[in-house]
Amino acid sequence: MAGLSGKRILLVIGGGIAAYKTLDLIRRLRERGASVRAVMTRAAEQFVTPLSVASLTGEKLHQELFSLTDESEMGHIELSRAADLVVIAPATADLLAKLANGLANDLASTILLATDKKVLAAPAMNLRMWLHPATQRNVAQLRADGVLFTGPDDGAMACGEFGPGRMSEPLAIVAAIEQAFDAETSLPLPAGLGGAKTGALAGKRVLITSGPTHEPLDPVRYIANRSSGKQGHAIARAAAQAGAEVILVSGPVTLPDPAGVAVTHVETAREMQQAVEAALPADIFIAAAAVADWRVEGEAREKIKKGAKGPPMLALVENPDILAGVSKMPKGRPPLVVGFAAETEKVIDHAKAKLARKGCDLIVANDVSPASGVMGGARNAVHLVTLQGVESWPEMDKDEVARRLVAHIATLTPTGKTSS
Ligand code: CTP
């Protein structure tokens, strides 16, 4: 890890209750040797005082766009460029909307538009605001523009609701900042400032499955699982950001399609298998989907009715194993095949057995027992299991897992063009 010694961070503080955590973030960054210059929006001043921010950064605080003294000392353009990384924390719905649409009507938004540096956003807002299609559209646009994101996390919110919208914890933001510096050579610059196809996976075709599958009982009922698709979709996004051509075969999820990724939507395991076969060849296949192991034999054409015979007996048949099928292709097998192992106990032992049984090159194993909060949650702790051994990573945001996994996979992939 590069460390943050000597790094110059320009911190844009938006107006949200999470701004109190930004004070701790400043402290954590300075502890690691970074210098922090802060810009506060008017709304941010309602949540933390300019004096606290100035004291913690040890630098002059910038608040006004039209300030004669500030402009003569350091103009807003210079301020936006005299940094190694721009971090928005908390990134409010308003700041994200302004940046996605190129608005610049205060110092914070002007700086974000004027900068030629990478931007990392740590969103924080009410969950309805985060899930609103307008915010999701803005986030997708910003990702496509090369803006990096950390969080938001799921959890209890200041407004009393529960769900995605909490700003990542300061240490998670620090990890994302370190990651942004680490990945400097493998991530694209904002659009227009550098080619998007120059990353660690440039020239590679990556096929990914994500989400659950739904196996119908009749026209209105189905068997499902708790997979949200967050991890698989994050990997698709990270692979696209690393310059790959990405094809995502997604089961039913509520997530937006990742920007810059070709997405095929399917419902059942058999549809997923067909879509995967149709999308091959690929250089890398990543099976992140939680494919249903069984489907109901003889799906009813009409809705099954209650009746005198009592509850229906459901006979199950096994679904095709998509990962094993691709791993064991006699011809045209992708050079790198990565599977996931969702386990609720003996995670590593089961993952080792799966690696052997399915014939893939790497298994990313995770604990999906209810206590872990992984299924549907924002965070994940994974173990990379290969024939060579096991590498365990600490718990982190699913976006971080995705970025690290993509960087790791890039080191395992032979260089050269797609095998077709
Ligand atoms: N997988 C697949 N097709 C299936 C089942 C699983 O492609 N029909 C893939 C998953 O995408 C994942 C890996 O296989 O990459 C392991 O999935 P998991 O559900 O953990 O394992 P299972 O094969 O279901 O084995 P078990 O029931 O023993 O846990």
Image: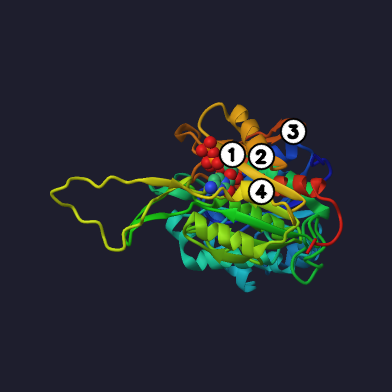
Q: Quadrant of the C terminus?
A: bottom right
Q: Is mark 2 within 8 Å of ligand 1?
A: yes
Of the pair 326 and 341, the residue shown nearer to us: 326
Residue at the spot of label 1: 341
- Give the Cα separation between the discs numbered 2 and 3: 10 Å
Label 4 or label 2, whichever comes before in sequence order: 2
Front: mark 1 or 3: 3
Residue 205 occupies quadrant = bottom right
Q: Is residue 349 above or below residue 258?
A: above
| Kind of residue at disc 2 | Ile
Total labels: the figure holds 4
Residue at the spot of label 3: 387
- Residue at 71% x, 45% y is 404
| Kind of residue at disc 1 | Ala
Label 1 or label 3, whichever comes before in sequence order: 1
Front: mark 4 or 3: 3
Label 4 or label 3, whichever comes before in sequence order: 3
Residue 88 seen in this snapshot: no
Residue at the spot of label 2: 363
| Kind of residue at disc 3 | Leu
Element type at mark 2: strand
Contact (CB < 8 A) between labels 1 and 2?
yes
Q: Is mark 1 within 8 Å of ligand 1?
A: yes
Q: Give the number of the disc on residue 67.
A: none
Residue extending furthest toward the right: 416
Residue 339 percent across, percent down from the top left = 64, 44
Q: Give the number of the disc on residue 402.
A: 4
Front: mark 4 or 2: 2
